[in-house]
Amino acid sequence: MKKVFKPFLILFLISCVATNVSAQLNRDSEVLNKYQDSLLKITRTLFSAPDNAARFSQNANFIRTLVTALKTPSSFDFAFDSLQTISVVKSPDNTFRIFSWYVPTVEGTYRFFGTIQMATKDGKLKLYPLIDETDQIKDNNMITTGKQWYGARYYEIIPLVVSGQSTSYVLLGWKGHTNKTSKKVIEVLTFKNEDLQLGKAIFQGSKNTEVKNRIVFEYNKLNSMTLRLDKKEQMIVFDHLAPFDPNMEGNFEYYASDSSFDGYRLVGNQLKLIENIELKNDPNAKDDFYIDPKPKDMPVKN
C-alpha cells in the first residue's frame, strides 16, 4: 500500500503546485490587462492633447503606470499588444525586450522615451531606462549609454553572434526628426557589467572609409524608407537614399529612395556594406507606418 500511496501523493502535490501557479498567472494576467487599459486611455489623451505641457504631463503619467505594471511578477510575458502607439519588441533569444515610444511636439519634432526590461529568473523587475539626449549628441558616431540615448522607436532586434565575443544586438528604429525630414537608425546594443552600451565600431563602409559605430539615415518626411532584416539574404537591407537633384546633395529634405538597395552583411566580426543589391522590395507594413506617424493617424484599438 505504501508503494502505491507514495507516487499518488507526489502526483497530487505536483498537481496542486501546477494549479496554484496557473491560478497566480491568471490573476497576474487580469491585473496586467487592467494596467493595459489604463495605459491605453493615457496614450489617447496624450496624442490628443493640445499643447506640449499637457502631452509631457500625460507621458509622465504613462511612465509611472507602466513601471508599476511591470512590477507584476509575470509581466515579462505579457504582450501589451493593445498599445499600438508603443513599440514592444522582444529579443529573439528571449533575454530582454524594449519599450520605446515618442511624444510629438506642436512644433513638429519628437522626444523619445524607452526602457529595457530584462528577463529574470525570479520575476523581479529589472529595467534599464533610456534617456533621450539627442540634442546633446553632436556626433552621431558617439558610443553612449542608456543615460545618453540617441532616441528611436525600435521595431526589430537582431542578435549579432560572433565567436569569442558576447552577443550584441542590432536595433532597427524609426526616429522622427523635424517637420521636413525623418530618420531611421541602425543601433548596436551590448550589455556590459550590469550596464549597457549603445554603439559599436562594427559598420564597415566602402574602401578607405572610417568604421562607424551607428548608422543614421535622413530623408524627406513625406517619403518612406525600407530598413529591415532580410532573412533569405541574411542581410540588413535598406533603400539607397539620394537627392532629387544632384545640386541638393547634403540637404536631406530633398532625399528619397532612388529605387536601388544596399545592405549590411556580417563578415567576420563586422557588418560590411554591400551596395546595389538585387532585391525584391516585398510590401512591409512597417515601411508604411514609419513614414510620418501623426496623432490623428495613429491606429487605436477599441
Image (cartoon, grey):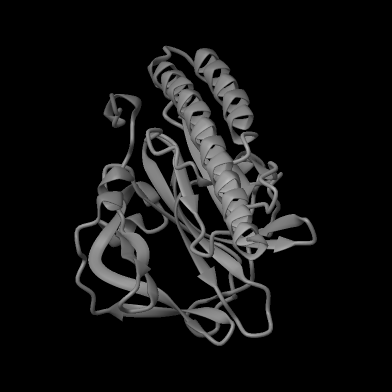
Instruction: Measuring from the top left, give residue 41's x and y in whole percent.
Output: 42, 18
182 relative position to 142: left or right? left
Q: Residue at x 29, y 31 (%)?
A: 299
Instruction: Measuring from the top left, give residue 192's x and y in whole percent.
Output: 75, 62
Does residue 162 sit above or below 118 in this rendering?
below
Q: In which image quadrant can residue 248 be found?
A: bottom left
Instruction: Measuring from the top left, give residue 79's x and y in whole percent.
Output: 45, 42
Q: Visible in this render: residue 299?
A: yes
Q: Residue at x 58, y 19 (%)?
A: 61
Q: Residue at x 29, y 28 (%)?
A: 301
Does residue 232 sit above or below 175 in this rendering?
below
Q: Residue at x 54, y 33 (%)?
A: 28
- Quadrant location of the C terminus? top left
Determine the residue located farthest toward the right in the rendered image.
193
Q: Visible in this render: residue 140?
A: no
113 relative position to 104: left or right? right
188 relative position to 46: left or right? right
Instruction: Measuring from the top left, give residue 102's x and y in whole percent.
Output: 48, 34
- Quadrant location of the N terminus? bottom right
Does residue 53 sit above or below 283 in this rendering?
above
Q: Report how many numbered discs are placed on residues in the image.
A: 0
